[in-house]
Amino acid sequence: MAWIFCFLLIGCSSGIEKSYYQLPTTASLMTKKSNLLTQKQLWIQTVQLSGILAANGITYQTSDVNYVNAANHLWASPLEQQLMQNLVNELSMALPNRLVSAQPLENRLDSLNVILTAFHGRYDGKVIIQGNWIYKSDKGIIKRDFSLLLDQDENGYPALVRTLARGWTQVGQSIANQLPKS
């Protein structure tokens, strides 16, 4: 009986170590010296992950039809939060005359909703980021799709996370270029 207990104890303690990942943030924002009362707010209402992307593990496509979530390579904080914060930073830098926020701060504001349908690495060394965004203002609605296919420069999860972050920055810049500046 004692040997069974030792076997269980050794088996439980020799598990594979988990690794946690955080998307690197874009360059820090310089303090804006402007009157916030005159800036029109852009509220990033949601960054929504569809399907398998909402899990804790980093998503990886292993074949043309198979996707897995890594059991030991996990997001350090919810991916939606990381993506939201990076998008707020990116749009704040790109749209200096707008007050970009993840919280609604006024009644009349413009809003942006982003849905990600792909945000993962792939078996052939590519990284895929796809989805769409909807911008609503008192002047109307703009809806656009986006799709990026990037090369992952190195093997491994750290390189995958860096490539995903680089692609997300590109998505943010593309959104900023298509939005009204004020």
Image (tube, rainbow, N blue to C red):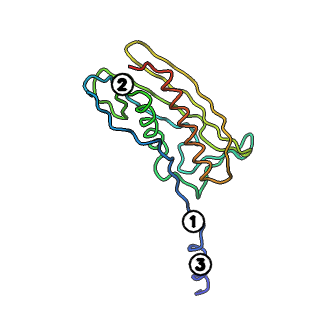
Q: Is mark 3 on a helix, strand or loop?
A: helix
Q: Residue at x 29, y 32 (%)?
A: 33
Closer to us: mark 2 or mark 3?
2
Q: In which quarter of the image is residue 41?
A: top left
Q: Which of marks 1 and 2 is nearer the N terminus?
A: 1
Q: Position of residue 18 (x, y in %)?
A: 56, 62
User: How far apart are the two marked residues, 1 and 3, measured between alpha carbons?
Assistant: 15 Å
- Looking at the image, which is closer to me, 182 or 124? 182
Q: Where is residue 47 in the image (x, y as percent from the top left)?
A: 47, 35
Residue indicated by mark 2: 97
Q: Position of residue 138 (x, y in %)?
A: 37, 14
Residue indicated by mark 3: 10
Q: In screen coordinates, is 37 left or right of 54?
A: left
Q: In which quarter of the image is residue 128?
A: top right
- Looking at the image, which is closer to me, 139 or 86? 86
Looking at the image, do the residues carrying marks 1 and 2 touch, with CB atoms under 8 Å apart?
Answer: no
Q: Callout 2, which amino acid? A: Asn
Q: Is residue 180 above or below residue 94?
A: above
Q: Which residue is drawn at 63% across and 33% down?
A: 148
Q: Position of residue 48 (x, y in %)?
A: 49, 35
Residue indicated by mark 1: 17
Q: Is residue 25 above or below residue 109?
A: below
Q: What element carries label 1?
A: loop
